[in-house]
Image: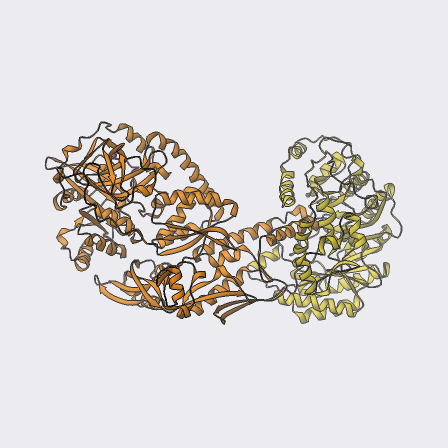
């Protein structure tokens, strides 16, 4: 998926921008039909075909009698898979076969609503669809709870899993088990779900289902007879999958006679109706008009609307134990529908469900508007996006170089990229994103500091607040367990890459004759910037990687400062491991050298730890910088160039006696893949500058 | 800030103005040949905030005449030149005369201080063409016998053979495009002369106009080294007259040389090397009695080019010929503010326009107080070693003096302390080292100027009359 982002970045900026504008216009159009249809899925998507709208009108509007589905006629399941293994295509087929959507060519990833989901082929936001399926003369209610495919979103995954009793584990018949297959399997396994392995894409020429079945046996200990071979694209054997859902997945536990108790497993915010909560009814029943209580806030609400998601909202009068649906109860703020919260009837209090651990941000990055005048617009875009993604933490921040902005915390790297992409695509916001950092911890030894913070262990998100070694007994850094699956020909290269990232090998198994699965314990910091891209390129794209958090470990961390002619530049201060201090320092000095223009005097760029300089670059002064010819016909062009330079000069930030363009900070602070984009943009500007050598302007020349 | 916002959009609007489109669409435009534009024309409204230029500046001008044709294309050149398919000379001469007449009338100047024939290759023109244009000038304005009349010469045998006739037609100064004394380099640059021919042409020119011959040389050519440049320079010093122009070769987009460098077929010397070439040449020329008076120009025995000095001193000039630029007040149509004027670029189109309306002015931009009097005066004036003296500045800025504008600036103080800039009783100027770094110094001065001058000024587009 990173490569996708990359490709996106490589598209010339201009065309990208116009593309984004186009999308935005489309979104606005959709907002119109959205209000008419009151359709939560329409929120942000440009791509939905008109067939979808038609469907809503065609559909039977009469309320379904939900009492027809007692617990034993209900199955709640999800689909888990590595990226591109066909999860969304299978979901489309299941929806079609059960009549939830019409069978048409246009059904492509119906559940992936966001532009970013479709472009990247990933699911970011969990979605739900209730299917009616008749098997052996009985009608069943199958609730498909679509989960994000990536462990960055494991918070979403585990929320979704908690509402399920079974999972379809999809594996590509050609590619076999990949890193995310493993990570997702363990999440489902730990949630004690019934797992049905589904081998997809058997229609492909290179499909090798036998090999994949044996991998599944080796890695997951599931007998190969339990695998279902399908082609979601062609619909081959998809019926068998539905049968297996009914036959193998246990019905939810719970009884209609219990008091009403429901789990809020997701929530969305709708500007017109307030909070729309997705609930799984654990016991009892709920009616429209009931007075319900949120266990978390102990607040009472009246149920205004409830119903099924098929996948569009279909209102019903009631929901019963075991069923999954949506509920609107006049909650005005997403915080009122805390995910993991328990809902019960006002007159029948129950014991609250255990709930979820709140998601913890593991990757932080500064975000600043490209131009300070865009600050209010960016603020409202971030506010709106975080309404539906409570896992993003937002903190105001400001930098002398970049102005006012925010420090945002994400669950992982992909989460961060997706967030940025949504900001750009859905809100047309242009942002500067600084290189990602991870939250370090320090165990304080200074009594004064402990008193000040009220605790011994503190978390440091901003490098400027990194406490000095003399005040600290130890520093801790976040760790992750990374899973890499790859053909064994690349093992050597991968091992040395991991070694260079301070990783410790935990485990290595052959999942078949050619493919190997390796597990490493990594410092998170070592993988946040470019690890995934390097892994992909050294394995010609064959290796897959995923990671999960693995707590904190003591680490030899140091704070590195950057100086221009002896003056420290606060916003460049970085926390690094002692072992990589030199290489990081050198690389940053080099990038600064490239982006600071030559001046009349020498500029020393230094990376320093305490008072010790560990890397240095020098920008030599200009010896000659003057246009050779300037006669009558040259003035216009010369003035234009000089005025441009004068304008640029006004925007520079002065550090000591050095004028530093904003671009320099952006280039150094931005994560690498963004930095390359900035470089391109600059080239473009230079090009334009040269193009202004309007032939008109060079006349009247004499010697 | 306010001002900056006004400058560029205004320039952009010029191209799109309905008046211009109207002009392009209809051949018959107001104003008979010889009297372009009409006073008080609604298309050129006067701005009440404009301060009329001082009469000291408006009664005289220099004249630039552009001859657009060349025999061949030099690999480094991106100027306005055309390789003619047929002999257009008679009509070109007629039109140059016509436009000279029209623009002289429009400017109402009574005195032409100097004339410069540039190109293109003006030495390809018949000497009578030069005579005809000068004749036109004499008819309408005074042109003293002492006035400098320069012709650019390509040092080919043909060019050399015509020098005497050019001299007889009124030319009293020759500027010879020697460019290099290395035959191989001349060839690869696409020049059509040899070093021997160049030396002979210099000799002949010196015979005709002793003390009034200039040579142009280029450094920073592909393959050139600091050492080879020094050798070439001393050879040149042995042959040249009293004026030398040194230009660093600049790679211009769209030229053959640019492409050759991009493809890696030729490599220009590194930045360090060209800087060294410039520094050594400045030193060598000084040792030989040549005083540097501008970034690229050196003269001894007071042989500075009067024509070029008038550009750097912010005087009026009239540009005649395809693509020529001018800067003058169109008093003839009631104007009070100096305009930047550009003639139509393409010779055939320009000819058609001149025949129809007497002149081929394509673009007119009214120069406001800040833009002209100060920014251009500053940028051009600082190119001279003597810089801008207080009297000169006062002519354009009677309200605020150099000390008032630049005296308090931190940036200017830093430049003074680092020894790049001087601001004293004489005025504002670069030091010896500072002059080579002028383009780094100017933005600092421009930012300061803008900060200090808060006169409500605008640069608004004018329609084409």
Q: Name the foreground residue: A199 vs A563.
A: A563
Q: Identify the coloring.
A: by chain
Q: Name the foreground residue: B366 vs A605.
A: A605
Residue that appears at 44% across and 39% down: A22
Relative horizontal placement of residue A67, taking residue A661 as reference (left or right): left
Point out the stretch of residues depicted in magenta.
Answer: A102-107
Q: Assign the C terminus of chain B to one quadrant of the image.
A: top right
Q: Is residue B434 magenta?
A: no
Color used for chain A? orange
Which is the main secondary structure of the residues drawn in magenta? Answer: loop
Chain appearing in yellow on the rendered image: B
- Report x, y in % for residue A291: 24, 34
Q: Name the foreground residue: A655 vs A346.
A: A346
Relative horizontal placement of residue A476, taking residue B262 as reference (left or right): left
Residue A516 figure quarter: bottom left
- Report x, y in % for residue B217: 72, 62
Q: How many marks?
A: 0
- Report x, y in % for residue A48: 34, 37
Relative horizontal placement of residue A25, taking residue B26 as reference (left or right): left
Residue that appears at 50% across and 65% down: A562
Residue B238 figure quarter: bottom right
Residue lying farthest left?
A136
Q: Is residue A105 magenta?
A: yes
Residue lying farthest right?
B145
Q: Is residue B247 visible?
A: yes
- Report x, y in % for residue A250: 13, 45
Q: Is residue A92 visible?
A: no
């Amino acid at each position: 998926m990173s490569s996708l982002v990359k490709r996106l970045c490589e598209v010339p900026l201009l065309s990208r921008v116009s593309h984004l504008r186009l999308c935005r216009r489309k979104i606005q159009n959709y907002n119109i039909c959205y209000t008419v249809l009151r359709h939560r899925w329409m929120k942000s998507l440009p791509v939905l075909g008109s067939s979808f709208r038609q469907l809503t009108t065609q559909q039977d509007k009469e309320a379904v009698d939900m009492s027809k589905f007692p617990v034993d006629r209900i199955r709640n399941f999800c689909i888990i898979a590595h990226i591109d293994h066909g999860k969304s295509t299978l979901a489309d087929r299941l929806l079609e076969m059960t009549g939830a959507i019409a069978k048409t060519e246009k059904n492509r990833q119906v559940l992936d609503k966001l532009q970013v989901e479709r472009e990247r082929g990933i699911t970011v936001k969990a979605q739900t669809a209730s299917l009616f399926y008749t098997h052996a003369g009985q009608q069943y209610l199958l609730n498909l709870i679509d989960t994000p495919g990536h462990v960055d979103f494991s918070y979403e995954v585990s929320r979704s899993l908690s509402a399920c009793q079974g999972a379809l584990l999809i594996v590509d018949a050609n590619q076999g088990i990949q890193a995310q297959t493993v990570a997702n399997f363990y999440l489902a396994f730990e949630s004690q779900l019934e797992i049905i392995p589904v081998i997809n894409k058997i229609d492909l020429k290179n499909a090798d289902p036998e090999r994949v079945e044996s991998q599944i046996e080796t890695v997951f200990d599931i007998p190969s007879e339990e695998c279902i071979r399908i082609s979601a694209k062609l619909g081959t054997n998809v019926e068998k999958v539905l049968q297996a859902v009914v036959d193998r997945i246990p019905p939810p536990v719970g009884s209609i006679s219990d008091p009403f108790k429901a789990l809020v497993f997701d929530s969305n915010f709708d500007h017109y109706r307030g909070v729309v909560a997705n609930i799984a009814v654990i016991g009892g029943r709920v009616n429209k008009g009931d007075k319900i209580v949120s266990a978390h806030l102990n607040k009472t609400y009246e149920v205004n609307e409830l119903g099924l998601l098929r996948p569009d909202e279909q209102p019903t009068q009631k929901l019963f134990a075991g069923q999954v649906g949506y509920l609107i109860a006049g909650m005005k703020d997403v915080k009122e529908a805390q995910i993991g919260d328990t809902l019960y009837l006002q007159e029948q209090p129950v014991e609250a469900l255990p709930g979820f651990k709140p998601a913890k941000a593991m990757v932080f990055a500064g975000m600043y508007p490209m131009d300070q005048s865009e600050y209010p617009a960016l603020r409202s875009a971030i506010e709106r996006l975080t309404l539906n993604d409570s896992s993003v933490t937002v903190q105001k921040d400001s930098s002398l170089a970049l102005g006012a902005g925010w420090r945002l915390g994400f669950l992982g790297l992909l989460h961060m990229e997706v967030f940025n992409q949504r900001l750009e695509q859905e809100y047309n916001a242009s942002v500067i994103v600084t290189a990602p950092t991870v939250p370090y911890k320090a165990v304080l030894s200074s009594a004064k500091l402990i008193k000040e913070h009220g605790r011994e262990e503190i978390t440091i998100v901003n490098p400027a607040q990194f406490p000095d070694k003399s005040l600290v007994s130890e520093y801790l850094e976040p760790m992750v367990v990374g899973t890499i699956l790859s053909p064994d020909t690349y093992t050597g290269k991968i091992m040395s890459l991991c070694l260079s990232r301070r990783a410790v090998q935990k485990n290595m198994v052959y999942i078949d004759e050619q493919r190997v699965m390796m597990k490493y314990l990594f410092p998170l910091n070592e993988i946040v910037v470019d690890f995934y891209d390097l892994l992909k390129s050294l394995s010609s794209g064959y290796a897959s990687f995923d990671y999960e958090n693995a707590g904190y470990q003591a680490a030899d961390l140091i704070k590195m400062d950057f100086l221009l002619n002896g003056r420290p530049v606060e916003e460049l201060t970085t926390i690094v491991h002692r072992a990589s201090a030199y290489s990081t320092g050198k690389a940053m000095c080099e990038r600064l050298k490239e982006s600071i223009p030559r001046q009349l005097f020498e500029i020393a760029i230094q990376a320093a730890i305490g008072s010790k300089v560990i890397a240095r670059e020098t920008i030599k002064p200009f010896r000659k910088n003057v246009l050779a010819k300037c006669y009558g016909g040259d003035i216009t062009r010369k003035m234009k160039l000089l005025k441009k330079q004068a304008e640029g000069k006004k925007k520079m930030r002065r550090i000591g006696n050095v004028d530093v363009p904003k671009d320099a900070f952006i280039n150094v602070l931005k994560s690498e893949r963004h930095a390359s984009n900035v470089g391109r943009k600059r080239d473009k500007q230079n090009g334009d500058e040269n193009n202004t050598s309007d032939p008109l302007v060079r006349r009247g020349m004499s010697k | 800030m306010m001002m900056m916002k006004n400058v560029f959009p205004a320039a952009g609007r010029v191209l799109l103005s309905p008046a211009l489109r109207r002009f392009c669409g209809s051949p018959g435009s107001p104003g008979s040949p010889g009297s372009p534009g009409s006073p008080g024309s609604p298309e050129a409204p006067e701005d009440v905030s404009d301060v009329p230029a001082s009469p000291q500046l408006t009664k005289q001008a220099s004249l630039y005449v552009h001859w657009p044709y060349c025999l061949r294309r030099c690999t480094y050149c991106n100027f306005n030149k055309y390789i003619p398919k047929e002999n257009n000379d008679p009509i070109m001469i007629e039109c140059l005369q016509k436009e000279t007449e029209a623009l002289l009338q429009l400017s109402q100047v009574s005195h032409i201080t100097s004339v410069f024939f540039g190109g293109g290759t003006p030495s390809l023109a018949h000497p009578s063409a030069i005579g005809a244009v000068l004749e036109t000038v004499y008819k309408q304005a005074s042109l003293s016998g002492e006035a400098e009349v320069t012709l650019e010469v390509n040092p080919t045998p043909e060019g050399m053979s015509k020098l005497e006739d050019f001299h007889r037609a009124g030319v009293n100064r020759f500027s010879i495009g020697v460019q290099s004394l290395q035959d191989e380099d001349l060839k690869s640059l696409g020049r059509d002369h040899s070093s021997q021919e160049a030396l002979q042409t210099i000799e002949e020119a010196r015979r005709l106009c002793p003390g009034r011959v200039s040579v142009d040389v280029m450094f920073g050519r592909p393959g050139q080294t600091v050492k080879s440049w020094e050798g070439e320079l001393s050879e040149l010093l042995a042959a040249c007259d009293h004026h030398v122009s040194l230009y660093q070769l600049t790679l211009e987009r769209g030229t053959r040389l640019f492409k050759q460098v991009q493809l890696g077929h030729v490599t220009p010397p590194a930045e360090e090397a060209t800087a060294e070439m410039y520094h050594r040449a400045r030193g060598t020329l000084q040792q030989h009695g040549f005083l540097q008076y501008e970034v690229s120009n050196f003269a001894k025995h007071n042989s500075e080019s009067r024509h070029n000095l008038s550009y750097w001193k912010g005087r009026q000039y009239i540009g005649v010929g395809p693509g020529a630029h001018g800067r003058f007040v169109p008093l003839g149509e009631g104007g009070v503010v100096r305009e930047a004027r550009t003639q139509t670029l393409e010779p055939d189109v320009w000819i058609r326009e001149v025949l129809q309306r007497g002149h081929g002015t394509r673009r007119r931009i009214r120069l406001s107080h800040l833009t002209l009097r100060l920014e251009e005066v500053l940028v051009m004036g600082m190119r001279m070693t003597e810089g801008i003296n207080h009297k000169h500045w006062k002519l354009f800025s009677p309200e605020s003096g150099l000390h008032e504008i630049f005296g308090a600036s931190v940036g200017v103080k830093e430049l003074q302390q680092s020894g790049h800039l001087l601001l004293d009783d004489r005025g504002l100027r670069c030091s010896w080292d500072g002059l080579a770094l002028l383009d780094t110094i100017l933005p600092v001065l421009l930012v300061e100027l803008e900060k200090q001058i808060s006169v409500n000024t605008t640069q608004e587009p004018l329609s084409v009359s």
